[in-house]
Image (cartoon, rainbow, N blue to C red):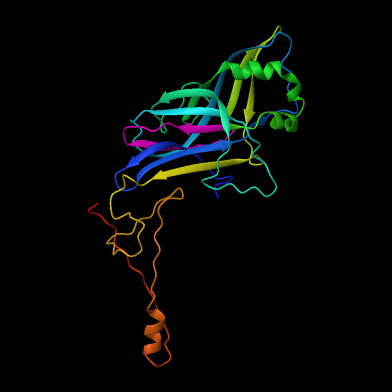
Amino acid sequence: STKSASYSLVGDLNDPFFGNSNLSFYTQVGLTSNSLIWGEGATTDSIVLQMIYSGYYGDTLTPLTIKVYEVTENMTGESMTYYSNTSFSHDNLLADYTFSPKPRSRSNIDDSLRAAVVRIPIDNALGERFINDANNFTSNNVFMNYFDGLYVSCEPTSGTGSISYFNLLNTRSYLRIHYHNDYDTTFYDFNVSDKYVRFNHFEHDYTTAQAPIAFDDTTSNEYLYVQSTAGVRSRLRFPNLAQWAKNMNTNVLINVAKLIMTGANDM
C-alpha cells in the first residue's frame, strides 16, 4: 500500500543493476475556503502547480519531462486500497514540462520561501473551465465530486535520470490559479490534505537489469538485492535448521544467532 505516504514520488531512473524504474503519483486537491466565488468578468491569467522538494535520488543533471493529467475516475471508496500498482483513468493533459530537478536550490520566487520547489505551468484552459462551471465551487464536497484529482507522471528518459520526493502536505505546495475579474487581480490556491486520497504508483522494468536478478529460486546467487518502491526483495530460508537440532538428539538452547552480510563494495 502506498496510500498517504509521507512523500509523493515522481521521476524516471535507469539503474545499471536494477533496470528502469518509473514513478508517478495520484492526488486529490480541494478548496482552501468554504466556497469560492470568482467574481464578475473573471478570467484566468496563469496556473501553476508548485511542489516542495523533500529529497531525490539519481542524476539531477538529466532533464525530466513531467506530465500532469486530470483524473477522470472517482478515487474514493470505503473499501478502496491503494497499492503501488493501482491506477485510475486519466485524460486532459494539463502540463508537459521539461526541467532539470534542483532539490537543493532555494526558490527565488518568494524570499520567504526557504525551500526548494518545482513550479509546473498548467494549461489556462483548466482555469477557464473552473470559472465557467462556477456552480461546482459552493463547497469542498461539491468541488471534489466535480474534479477527481491530478495524475503526475514522468516520461522515460535516455539518461540515468532521477527520482524526486515531494511534500504535498506542505502549505507551500499547491495548485494556484492567478486570475482577475472586474474588480481585482488576485489568486486562489487548491491544496492537498491528509484527508484526501493520495498515493504513489511504481513501475519497474527488469529487462535491462544486471544478472543475477533473474527471479529464479533454483539458482545459486552470490549477491542479495533489495530495492525500495515495491521493487526487488530477497528471501532467506534456512530449511535444515530444524533437522540440525533434531539430529543433536538433545535439548538445544540458542544463546545467540547472527546473520552476517558483507556489503558488495566491488559493485
Residue under the image location 70 percent in, 15 percent down: 132
Residue range in magenta is: 151-173
Up/down of 239 relative to 63, above or below: below
Residue farthest to the bottom, as pictured: 250
Q: Nearer the viewer, residue 235 or 32?
A: 235
Q: Nearer the viewer, residue 238 or 168?
A: 238
Q: How many marks?
A: 0
Residue farthest to the top, as pictured: 182
Residue 125 is at least partly visible in this image: yes
Up/down of 208 relative to 36, above or below: below
Please identify the quarter of the rendering in which residue 199 is found.
top right
Residue 255 is at least partly visible in this image: no
Residue under the image location 68 percent in, 44 percent down: 77
Where residue 179 sits: x, y (%)?
Answer: 63, 14
Q: Is 185 displayed left or right of 14 in the figure? A: right
Is 30 part of what is drawn in magenta? no
Please identify the quarter of the rendering in which residue 156 is found.
top left
Please identify the quarter of the rendering in which residue 27 is found.
top right
Q: Is 23 displayed left or right of 265 in the figure? A: right
Q: Nearer the viewer, residue 247 or 265?
A: 247
Where residue 168 sits: x, y (%)?
Answer: 56, 36
Where residue 238 sits: x, y (%)?
Answer: 38, 73
Where residue 214 sits: x, y (%)?
Answer: 33, 55
Residue under the image location 40 percent in, 63 percent down: 235
Residue under the image location 33 percent in, 67 percent down: 260
Q: Is 206 displayed left or right of 35 in the figure? A: left
